[in-house]
Image: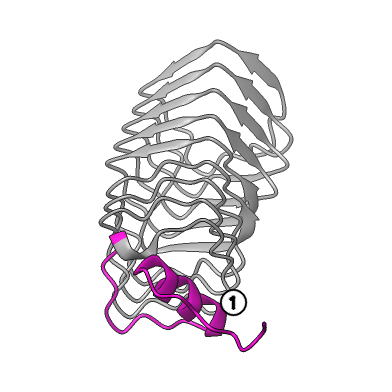
Amino acid sequence: MGSEASTWVEQHFIDEDWYGRDLTGSTYRGCTFREVDLTEASSKAATFESCVFANCRFNASTHISSAFVACEFQRTSFFSATLDGCKLTGSIFVECTLRPMTVRGGQWRGVTMRGADLARLELVGLALQESDLSEAVLNHASLRGCDLSRVSLRNARLHDADLRGATLADVDLSVAELRGTRLDLAGALALAEAHGALVDTGSD
């Protein structure tokens, strides 16, 4: 299906088949999507603002430089989806399928993904400041170079995860489950301090 760039405000889309639809340049504000099939859909520079997606399917879809700002995703599947340089600031994911998924950078500041299964995902270089990853499963995930400043990791599982090069400012690693987690020197210092250690860097 060809591109259908347009602007929609406070519309309801229910039980619709948008398979393979090109959403490039389209804008949706305050819209509700329920039981919408977006399998193999694509978008570039599309904007979804304050939208709700319930029981939708983004399977095998591709989104480049698109924005999903302050959206809520409920029981929605992103199986084999690609998010390339997308902005998800302030969005909430509840009981969603998020793996396997391809993520190439982007701005995910303030995202809520409590209890999400993100195991083995490559999230390299992602901006995740102030996000809530409480109880998320991040086993074997790569968070190399991510900005995790002020991220909540309470009861998150990070077994064999890669945090090298990640920014960990104001992150309490002591409340996460770490086992075989890969850290660089800065991360190791942050972990030691989280456990109450007084780190001597050799400076007076």
Q: Could you say which is closer to the camera, residue 190 or residue 200? A: 200
Q: Residue at point 66% right, 32% down?
A: 47
Residue ID at (38%, 76%)? 161
Kindly state the secondary structure of the residue where label 1 is placed: loop
Nearest the viewer among 163 and 25 is 163
Q: Estimate the x, y position of residue 99 in percent, counting from the top left.
A: 35, 60
Q: Name which residue type carries label 1.
A: Gly
Please tell me whether residue 153 is drawn above or below residue 67 in the rendered image: below
The C terminus: image quadrant: bottom right
Image coords of residue 59 (percent x, y) = 41, 50
Q: Determine which residue is flagged by label 1.
A: 165
Q: Tell me the magenta residue range.
A: 175-204
The question of residue 176 being in magenta is answered with: yes
Whole-percent x, y for residue 30 in the image: 55, 16
Q: Which residue is drawn at 40% across and 59% down?
A: 172
Which quarter of the picture shows residue 87? Answer: top right
Q: How crowded is mark 1: few (under 14 residues within 10 Å), some or many (20 or more)?
A: some
- Residue 60 horizontal/vertical position (percent): 46, 55
> In the picture, residue 58 is in which quadrant?
top left
**165 left or right of 46 in image:** left
